[in-house]
Amino acid sequence: MSPAMRALLATACFVVVTAGMRAASAILIPFLLSIFIAVISAPPLFYLRRKGLPVWLAMLVVGAAVCAIGILLTALISGSLDSFSSNLPAYQDKLTTQAQALWSWLNGLGVSVPEGFHQKYLDPAKALSFASQLAGGIGNILANAFLILLLVIFLLFEWTALPAKFNAIAKDRGFTSETLRTFTRNIQQYTAIKSATSLLTGAAVALWLALLGVDYPILWGLLAFLLNFVPNIGSIIAALPAVLLALVQLGGTGALWTALGYVLVNILVGSILEPRVMGRGLGLSTLVVFLSLIFWGWVFGPVGMFLSVPLTMTLKIALDSSDSTRAWSLLLGSQAPQESPRPARQPPQDSAAAG
């Protein structure tokens, strides 16, 4: 088969698989979220097993903790979602009025704004509508909470048998089981560190907004937690609806303080703390992050935006686990590979001196 035909066949397979994932998103989204939660829950499970607890008791403790966190999030978020959805038209109307006043002020200064331009391209009310869609995605996750919890429990039961399965797969396929262990360890390390820094980001944002008096600080904190998994772009998307809501509630000064809080939190956590803990080697290219955000958001909707970088990072770690695919991992990374220094050129030896 010619290279052109192979490329065409690979493209056709990609299109078919993508269309299938989008059609089966109602099934795939709970399953992918369950895998994500199971990866986070696996280290505590293994820790309890190392302490001597039997499998059933360790599973009971971890499952109870996951269930308690899910119930707490449902209780905190469901009320905020309903209230925000009911008040959204009033927020949008007030924001539209403020935007029209701004365009009138600009026209008074001689800055010509084409009629209808701001409503089509610069309508801030659409940002709040987009935030409502993201919140609706969170609500859909909560609606499938019981199914996700069951999948997490079954996945954790399977996780305890992974070492033996890795050895069997390695023996059959002819490669070392250490490759699979390294892949799993890197996934757990990335997920645990990113979840911890995202939790810190969400808590700091919620506390800051609560101090400023912005409505629904827990909802915006949860949004900051979820979108912190999307480097650079996610922090902007998470901050925009909260800043606009602060503009509606508190005016321009309150919006500036809200934006300043987001900037400080993302600098301290995202630019200083997280690189020190995680290291630069697990970074993704900004272009790859943006493209993955568009692709997975189109396939899975608002939840896909949250899953975009974890899924792409999983692919990068998988490619980096093998020498034959490490070059593709470098293409997805954020840094260029370090070139080994060239050996110093030896001066030619004098034939007379050599003699």
Image: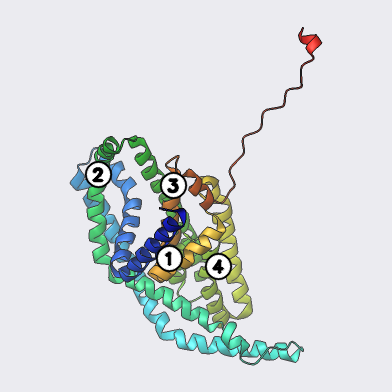
| Residue type indicated by callout 4 | Ile
Residue in view at x 51 percent, y 52 percent: 332
Name the foreground residue: 148 vs 294: 294
Q: Is residue 164 left or right of residue 299?
A: left
Residue in view at x 56 percent, y 65 percent: 262
* Separation (CA) of disc 4 from disc 3: 29 Å
Q: Position of residue 269 (x, y in %)?
A: 54, 55
Residue identifier under label 4: 236
Residue 296 - label: 1
Residue identifier under label 2: 160
Residue 316 - label: none
* Separation (CA) of disc 1 from disc 2: 30 Å
* Separation (CA) of disc 2 from disc 4: 39 Å
Within-10-Å neighbours for mark 2: few <14, some 14–19, many 20+: some
Please tell me whether residue 96 is drawn above or below residue 245 in the rendered image: below
| Residue type indicated by callout 1 | Trp
Q: Are marks 1 and 4 in contact (CB under 8 Å)?
A: no
* Separation (CA) of disc 3 from disc 2: 24 Å
Residue identifier under label 3: 319
- Which mark lies nearer to you, 1 or 3? 3
| Residue type indicated by callout 3 | Leu
Q: Considering the numbered disc 2 on the image, is that residue within a helix, a strand or a loop?
A: loop
Q: Considering the numbered disc 3 on the image, is that residue within a helix, a strand or a loop?
A: helix
Q: Position of residue 117 (x, y in %)?
A: 62, 87
Q: Considering the numbered disc 1 on the image, is that residue within a helix, a strand or a loop?
A: helix
* Sequence order check, earlier mark of 1 and 2: 2
Q: Considering the numbered disc 4 on the image, is that residue within a helix, a strand or a loop?
A: helix
| Rendering quarter of residue 252 | bottom right
